[in-house]
Amino acid sequence: MRNSQIEAAWKGIAECRKCGIRDLVLFADLTEPDFKLVHLPIDELQFQPGSSLYEAGDEGRAVFTIRSGLVKLVQYLPDGTQRIVRLLRPGAVAGLEVLVGSAYEHAAIILQEVAACRIPREVVERLNHATPRLHRQLMQRWHQSVRQADEWLTELSTGSARQRLARLLLQLCADHPDRPVRVFSREDLGAMLGITMETASRTVAEFKRSGLVAEKGPNLVLCNLPALRKAALAE
Amino acid sequence: MRNSQIEAAWKGIAECRKCGIRDLVLFADLTEPDFKLVHLPIDELQFQPGSSLYEAGDEGRAVFTIRSGLVKLVQYLPDGTQRIVRLLRPGAVAGLEVLVGSAYEHAAIILQEVAACRIPREVVERLNHATPRLHRQLMQRWHQSVRQADEWLTELSTGSARQRLARLLLQLCADHPDRPVRVFSREDLGAMLGITMETASRTVAEFKRSGLVAEKGPNLVLCNLPALRKAALAE
DNA sequence: CGCACCCTTGAAATTACTCAAGTTCAGTGG
DNA sequence: CCACTGAACTTGAGTAATTTCAAGGGTGCG
């Protein structure tokens, strides 16, 4: 079990006021005086694939704003099997639960190189106490989490493996339908869709053969939207 | 499609200050002066099984605190199949999403006769703006929703039908392990577990035969905890 | 009584899982 | 430069689980 600290490279102390993606992040609506309340340093960190922001059960000292890259939230069952419950993309916040409880509830594992800002819990709590502009954003993040959880349940855990994979690919390419999408390891695909690695592999292969996706490189595919939409519905 | 208003019986204007289950509900932490900010009436309503608090897409004018009974949150897929994404028990809040967006995202359908308080959106917004005592409770409700969503994904949508049903029963009887549990219609069981009605029926029958549950009446069973725990894990 | 609704059960068809070989490919060391 | 190794992926064949389709109870109610 690797320690996140070992894998994290310090990139500097975040200058939230000048943040390039301010309108995307938790602090989007803050005003100049609000920032005076940030009394602890917010570090900007870089994480490599395979490392983790935190592990389930770790004491929660901070939330993380994802600036770039991709993170999976993994939950383990008593019998050891794991399930990926959410993906975090740029703008998302990881570890919100520490604002209510104390420990992280998932493992947050990097899928694609991540740049993230680590915001100490106390900073969020102090700001939240002081300004409704943060409540609003926090509520929206919670809402996003619930929405994505419900979406995964209805779309990615219902129907045949074919339908599930089609729906996942549609989600992944939703932002840039014309850009190729990186597909995950077969094991991760399985953990997202609630199927085995082998079934994931076979289904991906079948999608390539049938032209639902076009291979553009290793684990890089272009989505055939109409065909995928049809597969997402069909029997 | 039935209208919630038709099915709802007015029970009076809620006296939140004297609420019998105050410590359980959204307004748990409010103080005397906070209540001065409640400028709109909070109705207490009664709903019969089969009726709904709201339907997906309805304009969200209020959240509902469940005082007693049981509610299912249903989400529909494009192809018409439905999935139950959460159950709401006493103390839970239905329709939180209207505090962020505008429309309800699920249908909230009564499974067991419900008494609920309808709190207009404006009341929550005004209070939330005024007192951190409500933020805290709101965050906790959001957190509960996310937790339950994740739990359903990992426990009720992973593994065999046998495992899923065992885990659901364990959840249902967690509060009062010695009291019998009401099991849902086979169709609802299917929609919760992501299996067909027939598989649900067969699995319930098998549980009765194998003594994992003891039938105490129509759709009323007593749980055999050790046996169910074993079934929740086993191959 | 007969209809409607829900539940149950059976048998065939389908889908996904399991287990077991192969394959590919990048990294390593001779 | 090339075999060697490990990890991830692929594929096949048999098996198990679930779905599908169809038919048969049971119960409440007009």
Image: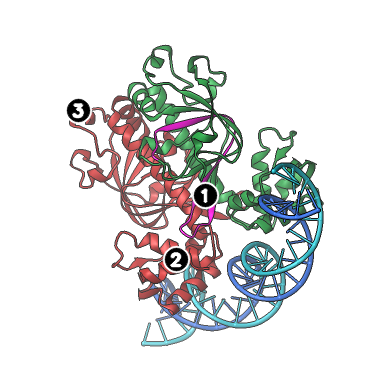
Chain colours: A red, B green, C blue, D cyan
Q: Is residue A202 above or below residue B199?
A: below
For disc 3, the chain is A
Give, as a three-letter code, the residue at label 1.
Gln
For disc 2, the chain is A
The mark that comes first in sequence, 3 or 2, is 3
The mark that comes first in sequence, 1 or 2, is 1
Q: Identify the element where label 1 is drawn.
A: strand
Give, as a three-letter code, the residue at label 2.
Ala
What residue does disc 3 label? A33
Answer whether labels 1 and 3 touch (C-beta < 8 Å).
no
Q: Which mark is residue A75?
A: 1
Q: Which residue lies at the image location 76% right of the left edge and 53% below the top edge?
A: B205
What residue does disc 2 label? A166
Discs 1 and 2 share one subunit: yes
Q: Residue B74 colored magenta?
A: yes
Q: Nearer the viewer, residue A39 or A21?
A: A21
